[in-house]
Amino acid sequence: MFLREILRRRILPVLTGLAALFLSVSEASAQPYPEAVRLNDALVKASQSYADGDYNAVISLLSPLSEQFPAEGAVWYYLGMSRLYRRDYEAGTKDLGKAVECEPGNYWYRYYYNLARVYYREDPAEGIAGYEQLLKDYPARADLNYQLADIYLRSGRTDDGLAVLDKIEQLQGPDEVMTMYRYEILSSAGRDEEAVATLEAFNAEYPSTRILNEIGTFYQAHDRDTLARAAFAAARTLDPTDLTATLGLSETLVSLGEEDAWYELMSGVMGDRSTPSSFAAQYLKNQSNPYTRRLLKHPERIDTLADLALAAHPADTALIRPAGLYFNSIGNTARAREVLREGVRAYPKEWDQQLFYIQYLVYLEDLEAASDAADAAYAENPGDVRYLELKNYLDYQRKDYEGLLRNSEKIMEMSPKGSDAYISAYANMGDIYHEMGRDKEAFKIYKKVLKLKPDYAPTLNNYAFYLSQQGKQLGKAYKMSKKTIEQEPDNGTYLDTFGWILHKLGRNVEAKPIFKQALLYGGSDSAVILDHYAKVLEALGETELARVYWRQALTKAGDEDAELKESIRRKLDGK
């Protein structure tokens, strides 16, 4: 991690443009002869394709020229680099070696050839030796030291890598990045005490919040909380606003049982308006999770921290939801509800805020309050159909059929006739009338919906199913249902309707595979579909198999399926 930062900050960008690549073009090829013109033209095209990442084009263009101009290092260089990018490591490394043979004094050819030998050969020794020689030949290029250190470390030569870092520090002096890099190297090698000693030595001469936080984290991970506390406290002395140090100190205080000191620290931080709300939100998220929640003698103190954060950041969307979820996690649903309600009041036009509050009320099973909240949200956002659709869902759960009809009428008034929203609302009205036992009005609406949209599958399915329940117009029901499974052959509900109509028509042999398909697409979780399939099996004389599916249906039936449960029990009892 830190090496990449070093490379980004310190190493000059590698030259891959024409200026670097054409250093190798010989005097002969620079002469104005047709072959030289052809070569230069090909190299210009290759450089552009290489820059565009079209490595196949480079290879196609230059492969023939490598035979015609075998002494041109630039040709082999482009081929080698392109093949490396294409993950043809053996051929790419070989081509770069030819580029070096053509021009042994070209720095970039040697640079990439040796890197390729280090990283893409099973035995990197020759590549490392070549890279070491490159550094001897170009001692002024300090950036090579960083690359060599990385090479040593990747090759498992930790001490050699550390020696290179020593050399770099002698040249330019120590800094945070180099110190952290050395620390990571020693840690990865299991030399923990040397690693932390490196941090402490640097901090003793150049006090650093970043280094102190790393020292604190080290001691925290090694269960040396007294030393961790000292490091985090020192970091806060350097920068009282450093939240990493604050969090680290708070954790060590809790681990040491110094709960009063922890509370004093966190009260000041959570109640400070300059503390980012995102910090407070994450802290409360951690306290909401039983796996990251700290065990305290006085857990109610976290409630106070949440209230302090809310007071410091009133109506902050980044904090409202985590705070509400925290109170819910400790069983204080009244406070959670109040917090989320404040979010709704602060942002009456934001759908996400409104929706989350209503979802929470549904979670609390307070459907009346959820429906009222949806009404209030719609009043704040007149014309937004989403709130009416949400209200419809809630009113359906409450079996407020009159309310459902009013909402559907509103949606139709707001939507262009024939639009998806209009059709859906109109069809819903038909479904509602059916639920109310007013099938005549329901079927009248279904006919009108299908005039507007003849292939509207939800209405085709419901109309067909309700007709089959009445045992009427089964031919018409069959045609409508067949359309639905042609549109959606993997819809378990539509397959159930079609299979049931076949059963009603006495075509049980045809119905059986339809039901088997319905079970594959979710029907196995539906008590109704399982019951229908069992009845088809019974009609086919497969009584024992039918009983298996009735038992499954009984386990899937919910409290609202009392009538179905009773019917299945009678079947199982042989009545």
Image: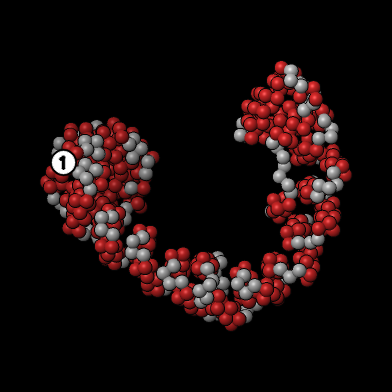
- 44 left or right of 430 in image: right
At 29% from the left and 67% from the top, the residue drawn is 369
- Above or below residue 225? Residue 147 is above
Name the residue nearer the viewer: 277 or 571.
277
Q: Position of residue 494 (x, y in %)?
A: 29, 40
Query: Amino acid type of disc 1?
Result: Lys
At 68% from the left and 66% from the top, the residue drawn is 210
At 25% from the left and 62% from the top, the residue drawn is 379
Tell which residue pokes out farthest to the left in this image.
440
Q: How many marks?
A: 1
- Above or below residue 115? Residue 572 is below
Name the residue nearer the viewer: 254 or 86.
86
Name the residue nearer the viewer: 227 or 175.
175
Q: Secondary structure at mark 1?
A: helix
Q: Quadrant of residue 378?
A: bottom left
The residue carrying mark 1 is 448
- 380 left or right of 299 in image: left
Q: Position of residue 321 (x, y in %)?
A: 43, 65
Q: Quadrant of residue 99?
A: top right
Q: Position of residue 493 (x, y in %)?
A: 30, 42
Looking at the picture, the colour scheme in use is secondary structure
Tell which residue pokes out farthest to the front in this image.
32
